[in-house]
Image: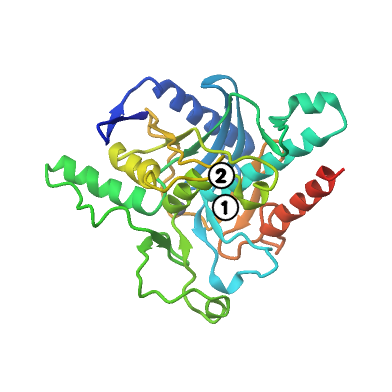
Amino acid sequence: MITHTKTKGLTAIKCTCVFQEFADAVFQMITEKFKELTDNLTSSHARHKVPAGIVMTRGLSMKEAQVVALSTGTKCINGEYISNQGLTLNDCHAEIVARRSFLRFLYSQLELHLSKQPDDWEQSIFAHQKEGGYKLKESILFHLYISTPPCGDARLNSHREARAELHHTRPLNRKVRGHLRTKIESGEGTIPIRSCHSIQTWDGVLQGEQLLTMSCTDKVNRWNILGAQGSLLSHFIEPIYLQSIVLGSTHHIGHLFRALCQRLEDVAQLPLPYRCNQPLLGGISSTGLRQQGKSPSFSVNWTVGDHDLEVINATTGKGDLGSSSRLCKRALYTQWAKLYGKAQH
Ligand SMILES: [Zn+2]
C-alpha cells in the first residue's frame, strides 16, 4: 500500500508492504463471495472481465470484515436506451455498479437504525447525531476492490508510465496525464474531454449523438471529494469516504496514486464535513481473478442480504426481459422516499 507524507510542501510517496496482507485478504473475500454466488464459477453469469466489490471492516482488522457489495461489468448503455424515468443503468463498469450496490447497503442500514427494535439500532452501522442526521459508527471503514485500474487516466497512463520505467525512457509529460476523460458509447476505451465537444443534450443523444460518460478514474476522484454516498443519501448522512482501494493489477503504483488520490488535493477549502480524501492504495500479491476472451455484455450486481446476483444487459441498462434494475435511479429514489417518510416521524 501507499501512504503519503508532506515534506516542505512536496508530497513524497512512501511505499510500504505493511498492508499487503490486508489487500490480499480483501481480494480473497471478494473471490470467495463471487464463487459462492456463481456456484463455484459454473453459472453462465460467472463470466466476466472486471469484477469489483466493497468490503466493510471495523478498523483495519479483518476479524469482522464483510463483503457488502459485488459486481462485474465493463460496458455502458447505448444512448438510444437512456430513460428519463430513471429506469435504466447507464454505466455498468464494475466499480460504478459496486458503488450503486453499496448505496443499497447504506439504505438498508439506515432502515435498520430507524426500526422500532432496539436490537436493530445496535446492529446498524449508523449512529444518530445530536445536531440531526446520521453518521457512521466509529471505526467502520470501507475498501473498494477492482481487478484492474479504473478506466481513464489511471489505467491508460499507468501502462505508459510502467513501459517508460521498464525501457528507461522519460516518464510522461505532465500535459499528457491528469486529463478528464469520457467513456465511449458501445466500446471500452476512453477519450479526453475537449473544449470543442458540444454540450451533451438529451434529445441529441436520442437522435444518435455519442453518449459521453465520465471515466471511472474521474468518478473515483469525485467520490474522494463528495463521498461515495451520492447526493440523495447526503440528505441523511455525512459523506462516506473510501478508506482504501485494492487493485488486482497495478502497473505503476506512483501514477495510480497521482491519478486516483492526489489529483484533487489542491481543491480549495471544502465546507465541513467534506474533505479531500486520499484512500490508501494497494495491489494484491497474486494475479487475481482473470478470464480470457471477449468481455460479456452483461453486468451483475449483489448487495449483502440479496439471495442472488441480478443480471443486467449493459447495452440496454435493463434485465433481459426488460425489467429495471434494483440499482436504477427510480429504485434508489423509492428507497430514499420511504426512508424520508420514516425519518419524519
Ligand atoms: Zn471504467
Residue 170 in view, yes or no:
yes
Viewer-closest of 305 and 173: 173
Quarter of the image where the N terminus is located: top left
Q: Residue at x 57, y 52 (%)?
A: 299
Q: Amino acid at mark 1?
A: Ser
Quarter of the image where the C terminus is located: top right
Pinpoint residue 124: horizontal percent, then vertical percent. Answer: 73, 29
Q: Amino acid at mark 2?
A: Ala
Which element type, helix, strand or loop, lies under badge 1?
strand
Image height of 274 relative to 60, above or below: below
Mark 1: is the Cβ under 8 angstroms from ligand 1? Answer: no
Viewer-closest of 13 and 91: 13
Q: Which mark is residue 19?
A: none
Residue 44 in view, yes or no:
no
Left or right for 7, reference 151: left
Say which residue label 2 marks. 228
Figure quadrant of residue 290 = top left
Q: Residue at x 44, y 41 (%)?
A: 147
How packed mark 2 is, by other alpha carbons closer than 10 Å (few <14, some 14-19, many 20 or more), is many
* Distance CA(mark 1)–CA(mark 2): 20 Å
Q: Earlier in the sequence, mark 1 or mark 2?
A: 2
Figure quadrant of residue 257 = top left
Left or right for 127, reference 176: right
Q: Residue at x 29, y 50 (%)?
A: 157
Which element type, helix, strand or loop, lies under badge 2?
loop
Say which residue label 1 marks. 299
Pinpoint residue 190: horizontal percent, then vertical percent. Answer: 38, 60
